Image: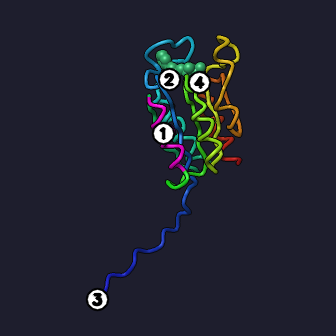
C-alpha cells in the first residue's frame, strides 16, 4: 500500500525574523558592562525567543565578526524564508557602505539595533550607514533594544 502523506499541520507557520549581530558582540557580558550591560548574546537570544513566541513569531540569531558573512546572510535572508531582519552591525554600522548597499538591495525590511546610543558616544559613532537604509532604528535600551525592535518587526 502506498504511504499516505503526513497530515497537514494545524499550526499556522510563524513569520521568521533573522537577528544578525556583528563584530565583537560575541564578547557581550564579559567586558564593558557599563556600556553594553551584563547580558550575553545567549541571554538576548533567550529574551527574543520568549517574546517571539508571545508575538507568534520565530527568531533565528546569528553572530559573525566578518563583514562578508553578514553580507551573505542579508542577501540570502529572503530565500531562506525570513520576513524581516534585526541588525546590530557593531562597528561596521559606522564604516560599511557594503552593508548599506546590501540593505538597499534586498527586499526585506531591516531594523537597525544598538545596545548603547551611538549618538551619545564618540563622534565617529554618529554616522550610521546601516541607518541610512534601515526602515527603523532602536538604540540605547540595552538588551531591551532587541525586544523593542522585534515588536516593531511584528507590526510591519
Ligand atoms: O551599542 C551597540 O550595540 C553597538 O553596535 C556596539 C558596537 C559599537 O561599535 C557600536 O558603535 C554600537 C560594539 C560592539 C562591541 O561589543 C563589545 C562587547 C563587549 C566587550 C567589548 C565589545
Residue in the image at 51% along x and 13% along y: 33
Q: Earlier in the sequence, mark 3 or mark 4?
A: 3
* N-terminal label among 2 and 1: 2
Contact (CB < 8 A) between labels 2 and 1? no
- Give percent across and percent down for residue 8: 48, 72
Which of discs 3 and 1 lies nearer the camera? The answer is 1
Instruction: Name the residue that disc number 2 marks.
Output: 39
Above or below 118: residue 44: below
Mark number displayed over residue 95: 4
Q: Nearer the viewer, mark 1 or mark 4?
A: 4
Who comes first in sequence, dot 4 or dot 2? 2
Q: CA distance from mark 4 to mark 2?
A: 26 Å
Q: Residue furthest left?
A: 1
**Quick one: SS at disc 4?**
loop
The furthest residue to the bottom: 1
Q: Which mark is residue 61?
A: 1
Q: CA distance from mark 3 to mark 1?
A: 43 Å
**Residue of label 3:** 1
Q: For the residue labelled by badge 2, is the local secondary structure a helix, a strand or a loop? A: loop
Q: Label 1, label 4: how many angstroms apart (C-alpha)?
A: 23 Å
Give the spatial CA distance, label 2 vs label 1: 15 Å
| Residue mark closest to the camera, 3 vs 4 | 4
Residue 95 position, x and y percent, is 59, 24
Magenta residues, as a range? 66-77
| Separation of marks 2 and 3 at Cα, in angstroms | 55 Å
Disc 1 is placed on an element classified as strand
Amino acid at each position: 500500500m502506498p504511504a499516505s502523506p503526513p497530515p497537514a499541520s494545524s499550526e499556522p507557520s510563524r513569520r521568521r525574523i533573522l537577528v544578525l549581530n556583528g563584530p565583537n558582540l560575541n564578547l557581550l557580558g564579559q567586558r564593558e558592562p557599563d556600556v553594553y550591560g551584563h547580558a550575553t548574546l545567549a541571554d538576548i537570544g533567550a529574551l527574543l525567543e520568549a517574546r517571539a513566541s508571545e508575538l507568534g513569531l520565530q527568531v533565528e540569531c546569528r553572530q559573525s565578526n566578518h563583514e562578508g558573512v553578514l553580507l551573505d546572510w542579508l542577501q540570502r535572508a529572503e530565500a531562506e524564508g525570513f520576513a524581516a531582519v534585526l541588525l546590530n552591525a557593531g562597528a561596521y554600522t559606522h564604516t560599511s557602505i557594503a552593508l548599506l548597499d546590501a540593505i538597499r538591495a534586498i527586499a526585506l525590511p531591516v531594523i537597525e539595533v544598538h545596545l548603547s546610543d551611538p549618538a551619545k558616544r564618540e563622534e565617529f559613532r554618529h554616522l550610521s550607514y546601516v541607518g541610512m537604509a534601515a526602515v527603523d532604528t532602536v538604540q540605547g535600551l540595552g538588551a531591551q533594544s532587541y525586544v523593542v525592535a522585534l515588536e516593531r518587526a511584528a507590526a510591519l
